[in-house]
Image (cartoon, rainbow, N blue to C red):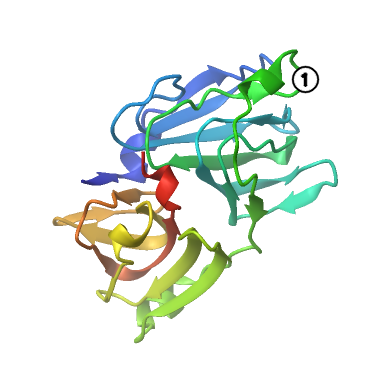
Amino acid sequence: MIYTRSGTDALAKRNIVISPGTGQQHWGTVFFGPRSSKATAPGPQATMSELQSNEAIVPHFHGVTMFQLFIAGSGTIGNRGQQLKPLTVQFKDHHTAYGPITAGPQGLAFVALRMHTGNSEPIYLDKPGYRDHLKPSKRRNLTSEQVSFSIEPVMQARTEAAWESLLEGDDGMSARIVRLGAGMSAKGPDPSIAGGYYVFVGNGSLVHDNEELPKWSMVVVENSESGFTIQAGGQGLEALVLQYPLEAAG
């Protein structure tokens, strides 16, 4: 299937949530599926978290492979304090620990994107018994260089599609950005070669089935689909194309 969700519509349902690790309040938005789950279910799972100023999330892991996009504010990740600035892409295999994530003084917003709803509840490394939940995994925890977006007239006036690689694995995993001028289109990856992919609108808008999807919208293309055309709106489009390894298809 192909799933779409408007960023504007999703953010209209932003709620206050409680961090299960620290008990601190911050903001949460659901794009697809439940915010957190233990059981496997059909369809994608995608959520946004918006942290308070200087809030920290303690190291943890999930049972589901995911991409994570740090899209607004600033912060750091890991004990070495790697800088997180918009837009940074992270890929993390299932059962792979990461963190801490610490927001800067202006807060930090990030989106967690999973191809299927699975065991996504966080398992915290400061809690006893966390090793009992570990399973074999490639244990990749990768972050990209910062992605820069075009100003609107430059994006709109682009006459050729441009693809740029951000992350790549030997099992079909990849993260790329595609840049398209006004009304342009580009053929997306063949969904069947890996585990399917997300198209995340970072700048401009994407058109699908006569719906214009604005900034921070997303499309999910499952690996059972025959193909997908990425269509830019009237101001052009700069989108992240996030392809999952085959084992992440669900």
Where residue 69 appears, x then y in whole percent?
55, 49
Residue 117 position (above or below residue 78)? above
- Categorize mark 1 by other alpha carbons within 10 Å: few (<14), some (14-19), many (20+): few
Number of numbered discs: 1
Residue 165 position (above or below residue 127)? below
Where residue 237 appears, x then y in whole percent?
37, 67
Residue 232 position (above or below residue 15)? below
Query: Tag 1, which secondary structure?
Result: loop
**Furthest residue toward right:** 80
Residue labelled with disc 1 = 126
- Between 103 and 45, the one lying in front of the other is 45
| Residue 189 visible, this orientation | yes
Question: In the image, what residue occupies the spot 31% across and 49% down?
Answer: 220
Q: Amino acid at mark 1?
A: Asp
Question: In the image, what residue occupies the spot 75% across and 13% down?
Answer: 128
Where residue 241 appears, x then y in whole percent?
42, 61
| Residue 71 visible, this orientation | no
**Furthest residue toward left:** 210
Quadrant that contains the C terminus: top left
- Between 77 and 233, the one lying in front of the other is 77
**Furthest residue toward bottom:** 159
Tell me which corner region of the image, top left, top right, bottom left or bottom right, holds residue 197. Answer: bottom left
Question: In the image, what residue occupies the spot 66% across and 64% down?
Answer: 145
Where residue 33 appears, x then y in whole percent?
35, 29
Q: Is residue 147 left or right of residue 83?
A: left
**Furthest residue toward front:** 136
- Between 168 and 132, the one lying in front of the other is 132
Question: In the image, what residue occupies the spot 61% across and 17% down?
Answer: 20
